[in-house]
Image (cartoon, rainbow, N blue to C red):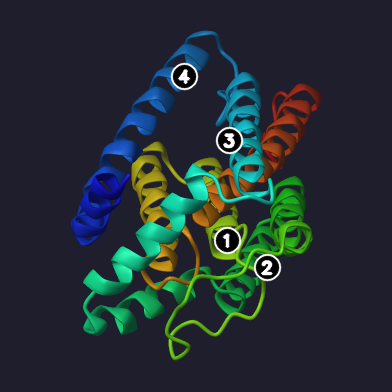
Amino acid sequence: MNTLVDGIAAHVLLLWVMLPLLAVLGGDLIGRRGARRRMIAMAGERQPDVMPARAAATLGALAILLFAGIAGAIGTGSPGALVHFDTALAADIHTRLPPSALPVLATVSLLGGTPWVVTVSMLTLVILLLRRQWNLATCWAIAQIGIMPIAYAIKACFQRTRPPHDPRFVTDLSWSFPSGHAISSAVLYGMLAYVLLRLLPARWHRVAIAAALLLAGLIGLSRILLQAHYFSDVVAGYACGLAWLMLCIGLAEHLRRRDARRHPAGKPGR
């Protein structure tokens, strides 16, 4: 366990640097799969799915299982292997991370904070309404409104205290599990990528996916490095956010397909 923790803590800044490359590779992979789906759909003279229902259901179910596993591991009342890993990693990061990195990490972390999330959510909603994307605007609003109740309800159930941290850069007073920043970044940037896939030409799709992966990844990693959360808090936050995101995207895709059947000659996806 100590060897694993030391290895992760020693290379955590390298992971930070590698995240853009990983995001580009992820965006390219998902973009290629989407391009193949569009070609197949066009050959069959039908509107291509942005997110197939089976894929959304599978990802959502896997996310729920991952969250349940983590919740069970930390919610038993007695420290298990995951809890020991969390505390050891947090302590090791504390000794290795240079203090000069904290202001940068805190700035990145703001991109998943409530003021920024609310601002982006409202601006996007206004743009969708101006474009008369009624169904898309509704699903966007549902996704963003659901973030806070989900995060705080789960936090209240587990009441996990945060790891020791520098109060100059971490001012959150809520419980640690799960990470609200991880939930909000997964939902905000994941849903924003979905909206862009619906509205932008195909040549921008890989960029939108890569940007969403990069921002969500940087925000989650910044919360671990700032020691605002334990490792499992962030992973559980991603899992929770992904499950909610898949539900909202599934609803949006259902409404888009319904409108396409009702108005086959019109503009689908309204």
**Callout in the foreground (2, 3):** 3
Q: Secondary structure at mark 1?
A: loop
Give me the residue at 69% from left, 26% from top.
Answer: 265
Upstream in sequence: badge 1 or badge 4: 4
Q: Position of residue 66 (x, y in %)?
A: 58, 35
Is 163 on the left-hand or right-hand side of 93?
A: right
Q: Position of residue 254 (x, y in %)?
A: 74, 30
Q: How many marks?
A: 4
Give me the residue at 61% from left, 75% from top.
Answer: 114
- Residue topped by disc 3: 66
Dots 1, 4 in contact, CB < 8 A: no
Cα–Cα span, label 1 and label 2? 28 Å
Upstream in sequence: badge 2 or badge 4: 4
- Residue topped by disc 2: 126
Cα–Cα span, label 2 and label 4? 30 Å
Is 153 on the left-hand or right-hand side of 64?
A: right
Upstream in sequence: badge 1 or badge 3: 3
- Residue topped by disc 1: 179
Dots 2, 4 in contact, CB < 8 A: no
Q: Image quadrant of residue 205?
A: top left
**Callout in the foreground (1, 4):** 1
Give me the residue at 68% from left, 33% from top.
Answer: 253
Is 213 on the left-hand or right-hand side of 137?
A: left
- Residue topped by disc 4: 37
**Callout in the foreground (3, 4):** 3
